[in-house]
Amino acid sequence: LNSMALFTKYQIMLTATRLTYTVAKYNANLVRCFSSIHSTGKIARHQSYPDVTSRPFRSMLYVPASNTRALEKLSKFTFGMKPDSVMYDLEDGVGPASKDEARDNLRQFFRNQKEKDRNPPRHFGLIRVNRMDTPWFEKDTAAVVEFFEEDADNELIHGVILPKIEGWNDVNSVSKHFQDLFGETSPSSPLKDLNYSNPATSPPIISPIPFWAMMETPRAILSASSIASHPSIQGLILGTNDLSKEIRLRPHSHKATRSGLSTSLQVTILAARAYNKLVIDGVYNHFNDDEGFREECNQGKEWGMDGKTLIHPNQLSATNEIFAPSKEEIEYARRVLDCWEAVSSNSDEQFTGVAVLNGLMIEELHVESARKLLERANAIASFESS
């Protein structure tokens, strides 16, 4: 009897847990729905965040804003060496004594880009600010708002990267800060009429500017689903150096398999995919080790990463190559679609929802994956030719 009672209690607890998860997921979907239709004033330019999941994010290059030479190089990269996205860094890549100078450099760089009579840069620009608990956060965020206001067409700056984010409430706090800077009220108010009540989190505060979260602490990994579900978050970026330090991994050689990080990386990927957000892999420190770097890029791609953060321009070519669909992958995807079309349109036989290609079973899910791969290949081709 005791065993039956314990089993019944366990079933009730499990059902309650599943129900809580379902309600949380339903509420998150409501948040995304209403955040996309409720926007006024200045927020209207930023609130309906563009869908960036279909554009290439193979490479994200760190550029310290204190390094004017590195900033100027961005307009000189040749074909294949151009980053898909750039992280203009005001945080770890800039020393305490150079924070003001870095902001000034970035301000002048953006103005120079606007004044030049040429097409805007093709890369996706993100600014990494300092943490909220640092003396530089206020000036960083004020500068970001200034940059966004001057970049009315959103050609240069597309979002803000938040370091050391550890949960939903952290995202809410920075969202509220940016709302105050823009002089706007929370666009989440329609949810009050829907009795929004997720006991695990406070109601969402939606930022006028899209955020990307650095996943670089144990708390961040354990809160990955909560962070990814926030409507202000557009993508997740692995901060593997800080994460390795925080979980006390032993120093490893550049030939290591990242086994100590595998759980953290895969949890972050799962969270991103659960909420249709982008996820970018961490850096590879040995920038002169091409073999090891390519190996880690291939590992990230196999695990489901959208791209990789880079510390040196000489890593760009390999990253853009590896994170793009290969010729073999494109050819196979086309064969899958051709096979599916031939079988599904055959009027002589009743279609069972299954096709066979060279002895391999093909179902609708394989067809969907093939279509997405070809769409990604076309997007990259279009992006590189622009």
Image (cartoon, rainbow, N blue to C red):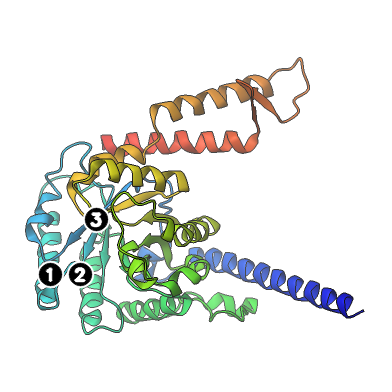
Task: Say the numbered circle drawn on residue 102.
Answer: 1
Secondary element under disc 1, as helix, strand or loop, is helix
Mark 2 belongs to which amino acid?
Leu
Q: Determine whether label 1 and label 2 are within 8 Å by CB.
A: yes
Q: CA distance from mark 2 to mark 3?
A: 19 Å
Q: Quadrant of residue 40?
A: bottom left
Picture layout, residue 46 above or below residue 83: below
* Above or below 179: residue 371: above
Instruction: Please provide percent x and percent y for residue 61.
Output: 24, 53
Residue on which the image places disc 2: 90
* Residue in view at x 26 percent, y 49 percent: 123
- Say which residue appears at 55% left-offset and 63% top-offset: 33
- In what element is the residue under mark 2? loop
72 left or right of 44 in image: left
Q: Left or right of 230: which side holds 118?
A: left
Distance in Å between CA atoms under marks 1 and 3? 23 Å
Q: Is residue 167 left or right of residue 283?
A: right
Q: Earlier in the sequence, mark 1 or mark 3?
A: 1
Q: Amino acid at mark 3?
A: Asn
Q: Residue at x 46, y 48 (%)?
A: 304
Element assignment for label 3: loop
Residue 353 marker:
none
Outermost top residue: 348
